[in-house]
Image (spheres, rainbow, N blue to C red):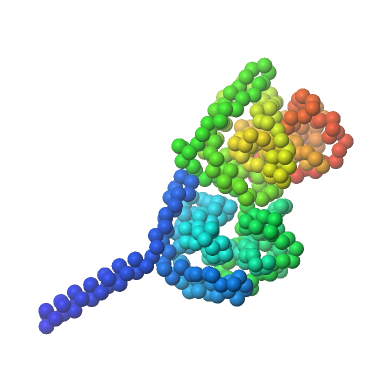
Amino acid sequence: MKKSFKHILFKALITITLVFSFALAKAQRYSFEFYDGTFNFEADSTVNISFNQELNSKSVTAFYNKISSSHYQDVVKSLLVYKEKYKLNDWLYYQLIRKAAQQISPKAANYNRYTLYKWFLMLKSGYDAKIAIGNNQIIFYVRNDEDISDIPFFMINDKKYMCLNYHDYGKLFQRENAYKPVEIVEANAKEAFSYKVTRMPDFKPEDYVEKQIAFNYKHKDYHFKVKLNTEVETIFANYPVVDFESYFNIPLSHETYQSLIPILKENLKGMSKKNGVDYLMRFTRYAFLYEDDEMNFGKEKRLSPEQTLLTKYSDCDDRAALFFYLVKEIYNLPMIALLYPTHITMAVQFDKPIGNPVVYNGKSYTVCEPTPQKENLRVGELSASLKNKPYEVVYHYDPLNR
């Protein structure tokens, strides 16, 4: 009797082990580098859903129903745990999802399937995302409540959905009434997506390169060896034109910050705030080559401060953002951004205004022009071409009410 029980128990243990081993074998393991870390995840075989059907609402719904019944939960959990661990903003989290979808369903092999995986993973991560179909194209949208000016969107029940993949179609993208949303409701997908980037990822120190930056201030040459990473360009390759507050406040990555800000602070020691801001104004104005966005990119593109340091050319939008960032980090003074019909410039609040101040909300701000002009403008001077021209204050920074 005892022998029979032991035999049955042994067989049961063998069976359990085989079942467990088989379950593990069914799970596909994936791993890829994500900036300075490595993202590892497993996808159960049930997550592997084919999609070779004709692209329409019915086939998209069928894909959604199949994958919703799969064991997808571990994939989404891994994504969300990584997001929380590395404090990823939504835009960077979307880059993680793009790479994960690429592992499961390569973009080049089946674009529609790849897009459906991105959409599904965003949905299950809690974002209010939509798929629209038309012109034999699959369009991926996500709800966004911010002021984004250069990408397509549609409205559903007074909610705005921005297109995340229109750039994949280029000139083939149809902007007017070509796409119809697929009616799928995910009960827990309620979050709006934000384009704000308030923290850059950590990159591997060895992936940085040094860029020589130089300018002359009061007959003295200043040289900088700024550490920069080309991954920054990749992160913002398809980043839209966001509002001024959002892109002014995109920070530098750690290595870039440490290679520039402490040296600037050292150079500014002993200077008054007025002279220090003048130094930063002229650094931003003369250390970089100027070119209009239409010539440089063929369209309007607002560069983050780190992109301006990285790229060869930049315009007034980019200089304004870099100047703002430097003044905020070093002096943390109140500032306003002044948008003219064809130009943007900055004004800083000092203890005593200089020149002809700009009055905003009862306080006086001193114009500081960070972009090259025909005149050699000093602190407090506005270009003659802008005098008596209308302007709008598009961003107000107050350190006391951040």
Left or right of 110 on screen, residue 356: right
Name the foreground residue: 333 vs 395. 395
| Residue 342, position as x, y percentages in the image | 80, 40
Compared with residue 120, is residue 241 higher up or lower down, i.e. above or below?
A: above
Pick the quarter of the image with the C terminus.
top right
Name the foreground residue: 180 vs 391. 180
Q: Residue at x 50, y 59 (%)?
A: 106
Pick the quarter of the image with the N terminus.
bottom left
Q: Residue at x 48, y 38 (%)?
A: 207
Left or right of 337 on screen, residue 236: left
Q: Residue at x 55, y 75 (%)?
A: 62
Residue at far top of view: 219
| Residue 182, position as x, y percentages in the image | 64, 71
| Residue 196, position as x, y percentages in the image | 62, 50
Q: Residue at x 56, y 62 (%)?
A: 111
Residue 195, visible in the rendered structure: yes
Residue 320, visible in the rendered structure: no
